[in-house]
Amino acid sequence: MIDSFPSVSVVIPCLNEEKYIERCLQSIVDVDYPKEKLEVFVCDGISSDGSREIISRMSASYPYIHLLDNEARTTPHALNLGLKRSNAEVKIILGAHAEIDRQFILQNIETLKESEEVGCSGGIIENVYEDNTSELIGKAMSSSFGVGNAHFRTAAKEGFVDTVAFGAYRKEVFEKVGYFDEDLVRNQDDEFNFRLLKNGYKIFLSKAIRSKYYVRASLKKLYRQYYQYGYWKVFVNKKHKAITTFRQLVPLFFVLYLFIGIAASIIYRLLIGLFSFGLAIYFALSIFSAIRLHSSPIKILKTVSIFFILHFSYGLGYLNGIWRFVLLGKGPDIRQMKSSR
């Protein structure tokens, strides 16, 4: 009976995650899947907190959990380290901040079995909030106004999509497509999924596949995170000579509207009214979207500010990426080589 289950590897990048890594690993231990068919690779960037001790303790209790040293200390290096160590038929990437449902692996296997053209499956992320700030950030990131059609966050769609988080991939996908781009600090999963689609595979998002994600409670880190998303997206676009998704352009147009509108209004006072009208439409939509998430006036106003941070930081990062990668023809700025996590 066990032979009918495909072998599965779970690969987890980790760096100073002592607060979350045990819960993440325990959720894998608790899954309804034969442990004889399961292996877990935690690829740690030489953590300086208690993460390594926790992983080692869990590994001693559950021999299918393995600690690997990721001396490069970046996410794509961590992913590739675990993926190349694995010989499993299905390979799943997971975040250290995540917990998976008991049926997570089985549901992914069932989804992949439905069609050979599906090279990757994924599901819906449920945000877990640790305080008021993380709740506001998480709910803003689950709003279509906040993140567009990122369906794994909004849970608005089941079916074929352009990307998922915590994807489960067939082994042969990596043999055909290659591995994660180690030049990318951000967007490495989106870029990989873009190559997957170009190679004729499809990505299926199933609402039956569930996981939880502990949201970081820092507006400063949120700003830097989305700035880097925009910045590195341009790097990916230039490498592939293509716009991978058109939703990425919306924050850029928003930032250009702000900069050009302010400059034009200073020079031509008659344009102040037109510029203000456009801003009024944006904030009206923002307030309407925030009201759908909260009833408290204070939370509504704070959510509006988070929407602005998401859109402005991504758009500004994208604009900087165009300047550096496209117009100047330079490589990545060393200051953007470090992840905000």
Image: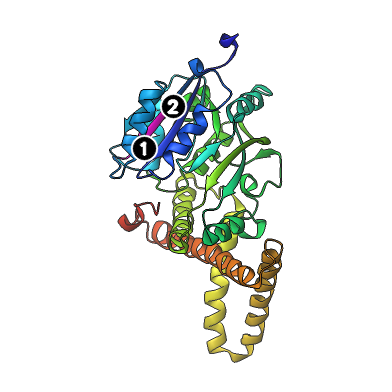
For label 2, count other residues whose C-alpha is less than 10 Å away and answer few (under 14), some (14-19) or many (20+): many
Q: Is residue 218 above or below residue 170?
A: below
Residue 18 location (% of width, % of height): 38, 43
Give the quadrant of the N terminus: top right
- Amino acid carrying mark 2 in the image: Val
Please report the bounds of the magenta region as a residue range. 40-45
Q: Which residue is mark 1?
A: 77
Q: Is residue 182 above or below residue 282?
A: above
Residue 55 location (% of width, % of height): 36, 33
- Amino acid carrying mark 1 in the image: His
Residue 41 sits inside the magenta stretch: yes
Give the left or right position of residue 243, taking residue 341 as reference: right
Q: Tell me the residue at 51%/41% (across/down).
A: 98
Q: Which residue is mark 2?
A: 40
Query: How many angstroms separate mark 1 from mark 2 (CA)?
Result: 16 Å
Mark 1 lies on a secondary structure that is helix
Give the left or right position of residue 81, taking residue 245 as reference: left
- Which comes before the other along the chain, label 1 or label 2? 2
Q: Nearer the viewer, mark 1 or mark 2?
A: 2
Residue at the far bottom: name it: 269
Q: Is residue 234 above or below residue 299?
A: above
Q: Tell me the residue at 52%/19% (across/down).
A: 89
Give the left or right position of residue 107, taking residue 263 as reference: right
Residue 128 location (% of width, % of height): 56, 49
Residue 138 appears in the figure? yes
Residue 43 sits inside the magenta stretch: yes
The answer to whether mark 1 and mark 2 are in CB contact below 8 A is no
Is residue 134 or residue 308 the one in the foreground?
134
